Image: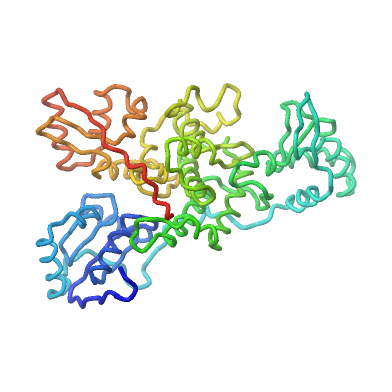
Amino acid sequence: MEADKPVVMQELKGRITIYTVTGCLHCFRAKARLINMGLPYTEVNIKTNPEIRKYVMELTGRFTVPQIFFNGIFLGGNDDFENMPEEELTKLINMVKNEPVPDDAPPIPEPGAVKEEVPKEEEPKIERDEYADLIVAFKESGNIGNHWSCLKVHHNTFTGKKLITWLISNRNVDKPAAVAMAKVLISRKFLNPLSENAMEDSDSLFRLVEHDSPSALNTGATAELRAVSASGHSEIMRELILKLFAEYITPDGKYVDYKGMATSPMFEEFRVLALQLQRLKFDNLDRRAKLAFFINTYNALVIHGNIVYNAPRTLWQRYKFFNTASYLIGGEIFSLHDIENGVLRANRKGIAQLSKPFAKGDPRLKAAVEEVEPMIHFGLNCGVQSCPPIKTYSAKEIDEQLKMATEAFLDGSDGCSIDVAKKEVRLSQLFKWYKVDFGGTDEKLLKWVFDHLRDSPKKTAMKELMAKGNVKITYLPYDWSTNAKD
């Protein structure tokens, strides 16, 4: 759209209603097209209006967004909008121009009635850890340096003896109190021993957690806030980066300005939150909390990685990105590959991997779920066009939320399509790459997909095919194109 030719918005007696969620590219594209057509619309974010969200889902039978209504007539999602024949679309436009909103039109929230769906009880409190000043002072004390051990140089390290000596002097305590204090610093994940049997008051080497993995995207500074709930923290991180994501989408909804994000005050706020992952404990999370925490963290890390690095565009760049982009969590390094395959897939080999992510004795095994939950594949967003849409997840509702994400993905043309005439079920490449997670055979895969389709014409068609037998499975093209703005 040329700057010297502004669009003149038309006057409508009726109403175009578009139901969206924060950060949805398809929603932005639909809104951009309406604006280019000069059609004003009313937007309702169903993430912040749970009652309306439930009503719209029941009304449309869909879990995807956007959902678009012209007065009381349901047009569909963005794909339906883009592919609607011009003659039919013109009729709908003339209707909202000339006919007022009917009583049975879908609802919009009353002024002041919006309720933020945020788990307030889980929200991290911005409270400084009482040991943070101690760590900052120790960093400035000159006791951290390089040490040789077993013919290898260990950078940014210090001996336990130096730490104890410094604590006795700096805090004016006796030796037993200093040793006890050092143990607290270790338990709070401010520092890590380099060897398994390191002693606090000895020549054993230690390193501050923030120096442990300099390549991780959340290191280089001290995590100064008190450790908080892992699941609550990840939800707040994810919500913040979603707002950032939405703000930097281009007007046509096609691309994301990651370079612009890097200069935003919101991104700096996000980086402060990401730092606190250094000290969050993951070994005491139950199944639901692990799923919610690591799915949210994975999705945030993908966007964080796109901001800091250039978005991967080739096969090799993608391989490197998913094995390099990482966070330090609870004193341990987790790459995107580690989170997806090590944690969420119960330590299974990933694509093109020769071995499991975590070897025997790896402390990160404590984070791995005991059994694979196949639905996690529809909660992870890897930053390309064919990935499932971006969402946030809570420990309390994770199973229902993953079920909805799965149904929404299968409901879309990128997830599953049925060709009755050819006796063919066309599935996303995700089912091919992770076939073992869905049973390992064509028969078990088809049954899994059928069981997770919502009641719909698609499910009816698949039932008909499966009853006849000899169903052919093919896989849909996967769009690896990035959404990064050049």
Q: How is the image coloured?
A: rainbow
Across and down, in percent, residue 98 comes to 12, 75
Query: Which residue is found at the position 35% from the left and 44% from the top?
Result: 388
Vertical placement of 153 versus 51: above or below? above
Question: Relative to residue 228, is residue 147 drawn left or right?
Answer: right
**Quadrant where the C terminus is found in the figure:** bottom left
Query: Which residue is found at the position 16% from the left and 34% from the top?
Result: 462
Q: Give the mark count.
A: 0
In the image, 156 versus 236, the foreground residue is 156
Across and down, in percent, residue 157 comes to 77, 38
Vertical placement of 256 versus 455: above or below? below
Across and down, in percent, residue 12 comes to 19, 75
**Quadrant where the N terminus is found in the figure:** bottom left
Question: Relative to residue 206, is residue 114 drawn left or right?
Answer: left
Query: Which residue is found at the position 24% from the left and 28% from the top?
Result: 447
Residue 99: quarter of image: bottom left
Across and down, in percent, residue 425 comes to 20, 32
Residue 434: quarter of image: top left
In the image, 68 versus 80, the foreground residue is 80
Question: Relative to residue 338, is residue 189 drawn left or right?
Answer: right
